[in-house]
Amino acid sequence: MTILNTTFNTTFNTAPFSKIKDADYLPAFKIAIDEAKAEIDAIITTEAAPTFENTIEALEFSGQQLDRISHIFFNLNSAETNDDIQKIAQQVSPLLSEFSNDITLNEALFKRVKAVYDQKSNLNLTVEQQTLLDKKYKSFSRNGANLSDDDKQKLREIDKQLSQLSLKFGENVLAETNNFEMLVSDQNELSGLPEGVLEAAKQLAESKDKEGWLFTLDYPSYIPFMTYADNRELRKKLAIAAGKKAFKGDALDNQENVLQIVKLRFERAQLLGYKTHANFVLEERMAKTPEKVESFLQELLEKAKPAALKEFNELQDFAKDLDGIDILQKWDSAYYSEKLKHKRFDLDDEKLKPYLKLENVINGSFKIAQKLFGLEFEEITTIDKYHEDVLTYKVTDAEGEFISVFYADFFPRPGKRNGAWMTSYKPQYVKDGHNERPHISIVCNFTKPTKTKPSLLTFNEVTTLFHEFGHALHGMLANTTYPSLSGTSVFWDFVELPSQIFENWCYEKEALELFAKHYQTGELIPMDLVQKIKDSAAFHEGMQTLRQLSFGLLDMSWHGIDPTAITNVKAHELKAFENTQLYPDVAENCMSTSFSHIFQGGYSSGYYSYKWAEVLDADAFEYFKEKGIFNKEVATKFKDNILSQGGIENPMVLYKRFRGKEPQPEALLKRAGLIEK
């Protein structure tokens, strides 16, 4: 028995991170799996006829200890990993995959679930109960319950392999990110870089006992370098290093992992009676079919490509006039875009950063949540944390009722993967009349404070924080009965609505006035800067849209076909990018080998959902703008119909209940400047 297998005697029942040893995880998982198996056995062996309560609800609330341990362990494997945790993950993943198969391929259990499902029209269930019953039945039928014994064994093998391959893919990407360093000893080679970036690079070098300025592939180091460094050769060096992660033909190469993952996913889909992996995945999405996704992406491509080509040609002419650049390369993109934006709008991130101190931006997001949804955030120190950088908050509503625990983890470190994400350590649900509140976390990789400056964010980092905080609100405000329908447990192409709509407040004067204050003087951000932010919001939106569409099309090219004949990852990728490519290809670079969203995260056949959700968020924010961005009536409708409802109903039903109609793409196209306003 380990501490992970006990009831946590902690504030709000939070995870006791400091008391958990790495060696606890494997035995804890094994104990919890045995316990969950016993709970399943109890459901099967009960003599009473199958009912919603003794079968479906019992199944829903089984394995809670195992879920809790999994949340803690896999969250740390992303945010604070080490060699031991990665080894344990490789041992644990097959065990969990096997256990999951033990449930979905259990004939006696499926028989009971099917007995309830077959009489659902006579059961007088609530909408949420009907959804849960459908979900439980499909979790069996979509995962092999109707297969022969031989095929069930094949499925087990495939799932085991896939769980290990995805982990290996992610480990390789993290190792590649951590392995690359670019040390520059001559400051003259660093012209163009802002003082804060230089100071951070100097500090990083000192922390590793090196002389000079150290740059890495972590976003807070990589993005400013690519945006501001005048030295084109060094930009090229850094860009190529980022682009060839896990594409070097060495022990950390992911090409074979990619090919194996897509082939196994296809094999699995075929085994279950689906044409492709995308057909399998999209059956449980708003989009429903690969054809619908393809037509959605192509329709946006038709609108975005002319704008993207126009923007690209302008950028190429600008770079040629400015520096005599004949052929614009990928490592020129951010650099000349920033210069052109500065020329066109007299706006650059360095002017904005003093007004975007991290602590002020966090408090600003809290104030907006308070004005919209009546939430209060209080920083507390009585909660254990897994790293000293993590901030911990108690969230309450306007009546002082406890709503959620909130963790915020903002800075890069070696044990943390790149990017930004929201996750949970404990879901919300109602059991035995008690509303269990969630423990929600956001994880980002922002610019760290230096010896002389606090953490000052770029505007892009501000929108990232607001994006993840939007996801967090979806988790925090959850108010459903069943954990598997709670918070962000919704259709994948709906999950980005709460995150993407929250980004809109970053561009609004009334919202910026709440937090955009100079970190030294306290002066409010000048309104001409606010106007410039709004004016520049659609800058290069054509190229940005094309880029997002290219990722969605690449995803579908791997998962919407039979991939068994693919032998060359790079050649396949080039073909997928054919209609969206603007810059010359870089032979030694490949995106797929580090495309963690689709090969490690949950976005396979789902990357299109970012754009899909943009249609929803632009349409939804139009409603706020019509009534006022802090309008209580609209905010309450959004909370009551979207944020609190999780996945208890079809998302389009929930959306129409909030908006009164289906979403229209015009709002997105207008916002992006792709059609006339």
Image (tube, rainbow, N blue to C red):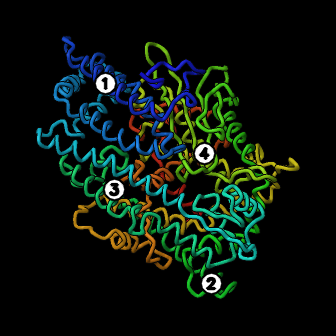
Between the C-alphas of marks 2 and 3, the distance is 37 Å
Amino acid type, label 2? Asp
Between the C-alphas of marks 2 and 1, the distance is 66 Å
Q: Which residue lies furthest to the front in this view?
A: 209
Element under label 1? helix
Element under label 3? helix
Between circles 2 and 1, the one closer to the viewer is: 1
Between circles 1 and 3, the one closer to the viewer is: 1
**Residue ID for mark 3:** 292
Estimate the x, y position of residue 629 in percent, counting from the top left: 67, 43
For marks 1 and 4, the one nearer the N-term is 1
Left or right of 342, for residue 249: left
Amino acid type, label 1? Asp
**Residue ID for mark 2:** 317
Between circles 2 and 3, the one closer to the viewer is: 2
Estimate the x, y position of residue 27 in percent, counting from the top left: 38, 29
Q: Which residue is drawn at 49% across and 76% down?
A: 582
For marks 2 and 3, the one nearer the N-term is 3
For marks 2 and 1, the one nearer the N-term is 1
**Residue ID for mark 1:** 34
Left or right of 304, for residue 567: left
Which numbered circle lies on residue 502? Answer: 4
The foreground one among 30 and 100 is 30
Q: Which residue is drawn at 75% across and 73% down?
A: 187
Q: Residue at x 44, y 45 (%)?
A: 86
For marks 1 and 3, the one nearer the N-term is 1
The N terminus: image quadrant: top left
